[in-house]
Image (cartoon, grey):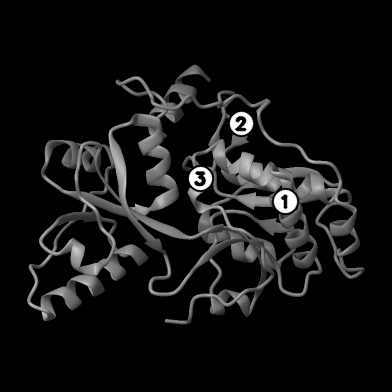
């Protein structure tokens, strides 16, 4: 049990050689997690046709592989993170007990459509293709971020700002495709090409930035922002939508026509107004990705 706890901590960067810049609560009790009252307006929006996997319970699937989204607490069995916090806000608002079900990312669509669980809260971006099978209630911006060494003077606000830089990016990712499109555009305009670097290991990626072998890392802003706040070794030097040039949002995902989406959207909007939503994001350094209003099935990213 002790060995598993240490290995989990190392995997998520919880054990570090330098003093962390942010103190995290990884206890299973989560005393700082906001717990709202029942939201009667939201409860009234639950459709008569809605069917829960278990009576009186909101069963939510999520991945428990990486903070700030979700990881195992110090007891190695309780899932904590920003996604569990959002799930708790929704469940409490709907007057339901929350049950979290850790799943592999590839497994959530089948489990949701089959009724194994009622919702998925796992950094799912709204897309037009997904809207054909699922309903969505938005709760966070989908943002990508450029992160450089903490003393860097770089500022990336538009595609031309990456010209000539050494940029680390994940292979076969949405951000890689955006970076490559930017580079193609820049080269066509006579600007210097980007030197694209790939690292499968987060430690090696961090060493490349700190040693000067790379200038910036481009990746999901939520994860990189969490790491920057925790370690104090990197900083944000540019951010843009994960759907660039379109706006993209992350959403609670439910079955198409399952009768829960409008109620969940109402619940999130109530928590936005009363401040619990902001508190939940701030606990995991995600305040910059807050939305002003939750929407049910907004326009999603176009089919590729």
The residue lying at 40 percent from left, 35 percent from top is 229
Q: What numbered label is drawn on residue 77?
A: 2
| Rendered position, 68 above or below 125 | above
| Rendered position, 255 above or below 217 | below
Mark 2 vs mark 1: in front: 1
Residue 74's spot in the image, x, y percent?
A: 55, 24
On the question of residue 100 being in view, the answer is no
Marks 3 and 2, how far apart at CA: 24 Å
Name the residue that disc number 3 marks: 286
The residue lying at 25 percent from left, 74 percent from top is 181
Q: Of helix, strand and loop, which one carries label 1?
A: helix
Mark 3 vs mark 2: in front: 3
Q: Is residue 131 left or right of residue 152?
A: right
Mark closer to the chain start, 2 or 1: 2
Residue 119's spot in the image, x, y percent?
A: 70, 58
Q: What numbered label is drawn on residue 273?
A: 1
Residues packed near mark 1 inside 10 Å, few (<14), some (14 to 19) or many (20 plus): few
The residue lying at 71 percent from left, 66 percent from top is 114
Residue 54's spot in the image, x, y percent?
A: 84, 52
């Amino acid at each position: 049990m002790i060995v598993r706890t240490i290995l989990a901590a190392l995997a998520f960067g919880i054990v570090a050689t330098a003093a962390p810049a942010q103190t995290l609560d990884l206890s299973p009790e989560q005393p700082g997690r906001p717990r709202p009252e029942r939201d009667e307006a939201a409860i009234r929006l639950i459709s008569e046709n809605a069917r829960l996997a278990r009576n009186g319970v909101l069963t939510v699937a999520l991945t428990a592989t990486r903070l700030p989204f979700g990881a195992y607490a110090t007891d190695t069995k309780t899932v904590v993170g920003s996604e569990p916090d959002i799930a708790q806000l929704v469940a409490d608002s709907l007057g339901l007990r929350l049950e979290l079900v850790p799943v592999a990312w590839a497994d959530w669509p089948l489990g949701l459509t089959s009724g194994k669980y009622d919702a998925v809260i796992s950094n799912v971006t709204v897309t037009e293709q997904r809207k054909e099978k699922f309903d969505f209630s938005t709760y966070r911006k989908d943002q990508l971020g450029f992160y450089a060494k903490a003393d860097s003077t770089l500022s990336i606000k538009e595609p031309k700002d990456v010209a000539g830089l050494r940029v680390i990016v994940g292979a076969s990712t949405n951000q890689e495709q955006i970076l490559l499109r930017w580079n193609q555009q820049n080269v066509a305009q006579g600007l210097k090409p980007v030197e694209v670097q790939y690292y499968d290991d987060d430690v090696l990626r961090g060493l490349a930035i700190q040693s000067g072998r790379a200038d910036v890392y481009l990746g999901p802003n939520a994860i990189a922002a969490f790491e920057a706040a925790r370690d104090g070794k990197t900083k944000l030097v540019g951010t843009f939508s994960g759907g660039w040039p379109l706006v993209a949002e992350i959403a609670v995902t439910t079955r198409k026509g399952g009768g829960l989406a409008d109620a969940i959207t109402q619940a999130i909007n109530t928590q936005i107004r009363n401040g619990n939503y902001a508190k939940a994001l701030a606990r995991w350094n995600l305040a910059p990705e807050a939305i002003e209003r939750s929407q049910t099935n907004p326009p999603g990213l176009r089919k590729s």
